[in-house]
Image (spheres, rainbow, N blue to C red):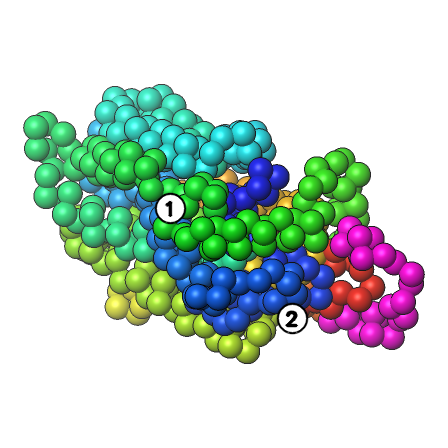
């Protein structure tokens, strides 16, 4: 979205989506600070700098803004879990699975309105669209702290989903850092909730109301500031010199010509994408991890409270697992980039998460061990997810296949959020939430199986293409249109 020509829609387009070029693998995708970029677009970099330095300069302006934005979006989305510890369900008189339904209602507009929001995004400047969306979900969060009954909670959760529809970064480059903002949001949310909890019953409001109100106010204030600092297009970036702006613009134009981005995506393009069975496998890779990811985000404080901690201690103990997941995801991303490999760095964290859930489902009398298992769960789930998305995205060659394939993976995956909201029900608490843990293990295994199938598929297709003739008389434009289906394209494992 940043600095793109109006037909580009990914946040890395300030640099140009050079990774769209066939046969080019960008190891930077899985790590926010990785190495050199390709030079195959033949655009002259200004003599006073290098491409690496210019990219770093842009990153320092763009990535912190996007990361803070996404952090606050995830914080406002999941702080209901922290609020629940401070009496939300009791004061609103929630019974049975009504709390779970309130969680679910968020995902209905979040999924349904994704395409309309993308259309609006292309008609508005990024600083306007993102700031408005951010202010909207901050305002709705404040309203969430003022509701008086179950109906009011449902309404605010629905409109929160509407407001956050435009927030998910359709990221390829630097996706790990964006996604790891969710881990920081979880840690930040726990710290805030522990502090805000001391305002319990201040001015007649219980602690859960103050969590929504204060965190919503914070989001609105940041949204107002971001309206003036979010960069839109390269020609408007005052912190770039004239030569640097010209270079970025030329790179964008050349790159979009290479990727056929100037041609709009039609129905035939979408149908052709879904003729590739790997597209469906990619959806299930992500879908399988969304369920345990959202299950943890929505129910971790409640689970931790069963270990005998007070309300404030529960919030504080929710912080370390989130912090550990952030650090571990950075480590996984670094080594995934270093070895230019993805498959092993999805399976290893997934196995770690399975071990964590295995402990939780079997051990019920050792709170220290149970708490330690939460570290394994967060470190495993939240480090595997960005690698899976980057791996799948990098293997989608061409603008059209990448746009449709990425939207499918994220859109289909978010359906898992609905399943997650009903994974841990109140009636399962006496049984130590065995049902919820079993559901999480099942979906993690689904993700692992999908990753193995996907790895086998790309290996097999690479070998078949090595044996097949590549000189089929295709023009460069035809190869670009085919994307990763071109006979001379090689997939990344």
The residue at 33%/28% (across/down) is: 140
The tally of labels here is 2
Q: Which residues are magenta?
A: 457-481
The residue at 83%/70% (across/down) is: 465
51 left or right, relative to 477: left
Across and down, in percent, residue 356 comes to 41, 66
The residue at 20%/46% (across/down) is: 193
Spot the residue most to the bottom.
Answer: 339
Q: Please, what secondary structure does the residue beneath circle 1 have? A: loop
Q: Nearer the viewer, residue 412 or 478?
A: 478
Image disc number at residue 493: 2
Across and down, in percent, residue 133 comes to 40, 32
Across and down, in percent, residue 9 comes to 56, 42
396 left or right, relative to 48: right
Q: Nearer the viewer, residue 86 or 166?
A: 166
Q: Is residue 471 magenta?
A: yes
Q: Is residue 40 magenta?
A: no
Place residue 200 in its image quadrant: top left
Question: Residue tagged by mark 1?
Answer: 238
Is residue 67 depicted above or below 166 in this figure?
Answer: below
Q: Please, what secondary structure does the residue beneath circle 2 have? A: loop
Which quarter of the rendered picture does the C terminus lie within? Answer: bottom right
Is residue 189 depicted above or below 20 in this figure?
Answer: above
Estimate the spatial distance between the alpha carbons at disc 1 and disc 2, rounded to whole Å.
40 Å
The residue at 29%/34% (across/down) is: 224
Kindly report which numbered mark, 1 or 2, lies closer to the viewer in this rendering.
1
Magenta span dominant secondary structure: helix
90 left or right, relative to 431: left
């Amino acid at each position: 979205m940043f600095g793109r020509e109006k037909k580009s829609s990914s946040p890395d387009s300030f640099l140009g989506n050079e990774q769209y070029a066939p046969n080019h693998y960008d190891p930077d995708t899985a790590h926010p600070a990785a190495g050199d970029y390709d030079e195959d677009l033949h655009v002259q970099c200004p003599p006073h700098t290098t491409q690496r330095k210019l990219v770093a300069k842009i990153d320092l302006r763009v990535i912190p803004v996007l990361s803070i934005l996404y952090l606050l979006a995830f914080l406002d989305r999941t702080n209901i879990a922290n609020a629940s510890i401070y009496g939300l369900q009791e004061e609103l008189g929630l019974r049975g699975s009504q709390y779970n339904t309130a969680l679910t209602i968020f995902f209905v507009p979040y999924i349904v309105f994704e395409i309309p929001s993308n259309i609006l995004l292309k008609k508005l400047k990024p600083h306007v669209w993102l700031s408005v969306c951010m202010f909207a979900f901050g305002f709705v969060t404040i309203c969430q702290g003022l509701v008086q009954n179950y109906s009011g909670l449902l309404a605010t959760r629905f409109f929160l989903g509407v407001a956050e529809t435009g927030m998910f970064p359709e990221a390829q480059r630097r996706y790990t850092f964006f996604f790891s903002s969710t881990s920081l949001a979880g840690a930040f949310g726990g710290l805030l909730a522990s502090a805000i909890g001391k305002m319990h019953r201040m001015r007649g409001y219980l602690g859960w109301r103050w969590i929504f109100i204060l965190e919503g106010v914070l989001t609105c204030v940041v949204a107002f500031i971001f309206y003036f600092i979010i960069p839109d297009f390269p020609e408007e970036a005052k912190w770039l010199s004239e030569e640097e702006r010209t270079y970025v613009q030329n790179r964008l134009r050349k790159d979009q010509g290479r990727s056929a981005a100037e041609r709009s995506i039609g129905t035939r393009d979408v149908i052709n994408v879904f003729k590739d069975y790997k597209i469906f496998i990619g959806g299930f890779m992500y879908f399988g991890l969304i369920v345990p990811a959202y299950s943890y985000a929505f129910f971790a404080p409640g689970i931790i409270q069963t270990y005998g901690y007070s309300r404030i201690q529960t919030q504080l103990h929710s912080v370390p697992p989130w912090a550990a997941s952030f650090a571990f995801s950075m480590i996984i991303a670094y080594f995934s980039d270093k070895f230019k490999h993805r498959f092993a760095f999805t399976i290893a964290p997934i196995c770690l998460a399975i071990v964590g859930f295995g402990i939780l489902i079997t051990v019920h009398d050792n709170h220290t061990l149970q708490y330690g298992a939460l570290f394994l769960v967060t470190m495993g789930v939240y480090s595997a997810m960005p690698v899976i998305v980057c791996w799948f995205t990098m293997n989608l060659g061409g603008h059209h296949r990448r746009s449709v394939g990425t939207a499918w993976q994220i859109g289909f995956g978010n359906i898992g959020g609905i399943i997650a909201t009903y994974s841990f029900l109140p009636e399962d608490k006496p049984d130590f939430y065995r049902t919820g843990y079993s559901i999480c293990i099942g979906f993690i295994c689904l993700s692992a199986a999908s990753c193995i199938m996907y790895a086998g598929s790309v290996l097999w297709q690479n070998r078949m293409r090595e044996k097949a003739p590549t000189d089929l008389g295709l023009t460069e434009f035809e190869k670009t249109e085919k994307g990763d289906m071109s006979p001379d394209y090689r997939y990344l494992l």
